[in-house]
Image (spheres, rainbow, N blue to C red):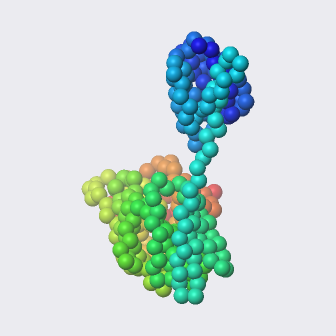
Amino acid sequence: MKYLLKSCYPCIVKTNSEFCELSTNDTLEIDNESCLFVYPQKANRISFMINLLSPVENKFFSLLKQNENTLIILEDQTKIKTTKKKILNFGDQSCELSISNNLISFETNQSKIEIETESKYEFIIEKIKSFACVYNKQEFYAFSIKKSRLTQIYGDNIELNNNILTIEKYFDDSLNRKRTATFKIDEDIQLEKEEFYRDTVAGQTELLPYRILESIKAKDFDFVYKHLNETLQSKIQKSQLGTFFGNINCFLPLSTKEFICISNKSKSYITFDLVDDKICDISMDEI
């Protein structure tokens, strides 16, 4: 049977014998085919099959008789957008929360804050103290009614129990590091406790500089400070390590002791000197 296929969007159509590329509003003549496979070339559109032996209209295409031909129209798949809304009251103030696909919105009479998320998990809305909270197992957002400020916390496993927030973060590094942090939500969101768990690795002193930088990136400053010699420990406090190294996003090893480190604002060349299993000197130059 002969069909005419008209597409409302760019796509690739596969017949038994060939691939045909169609632009918007192109028409393709089809004869002696049992089925077609359609591959849309637009984002967020799924592929599908059309059985030409007994085609049945659905959300992907419609059928239209035109003279002696049957016209198959590939419909533009409308993306459905749903919005979840909730109003939280805080005394004489209120906050309207909206969750629509990948957009979260916090709105009061004074301000509105929006944040995009690509999370695949469903969000929960909750009021805690003076915070409007939206969270799932990997993302936590808290909007302060008093300060009109948004706090964002991410992890691999998030749990909220009353006003206690527990975050677990796994680092894919050489020590299989895991960070567990506990926050208390009160007048502010305060870090109550933080612990790092790591594999115990004996020897391999030559890998220590690499692991030091992994630890800086993970903000595991206990590990860093523990592996500085006494001279360096007397010159720098553990609380100063984050400022000293900066916010390292990634690093490139040039050797076991030389690295290029990249932060938000700069690139640095860093070298380490070791004595036994301790770092005895660190040199850092911007490049």
**Farthest residue in the bottom direction?**
92
Q: Where is residue 242 in the image (x, y as percent from the top left)?
A: 50, 70
Judge from the rendering whether residue 201 lies leftward or rightward of residue 108; answer left or right.
left
> Is residue 266 shown above or below 7?
below
> Looking at this view, is 116 or 179 the one in front?
116
**Farthest residue in the top direction?**
32
> Looking at this view, is 239 or 137 the one in front?
137
Judge from the rendering whether residue 160 lies leftward or rightward of residue 74; answer left or right.
left
Q: Position of residue 187 (x, y in %)?
A: 48, 86
Residue at 68 percent across and 16 percent down: it is 68
> Is residue 114 shown above or below 68?
below
Residue at 63 percent across and 57 percent down: it is 287
Residue at 53 percent across and 81 percent down: it is 89
> Looking at this view, is 29 or 251 the one in front?
29
Residue 286 visible from this viewpoint: no
Q: Where is residue 270 in the image (x, y as percent from the top left)?
A: 52, 58
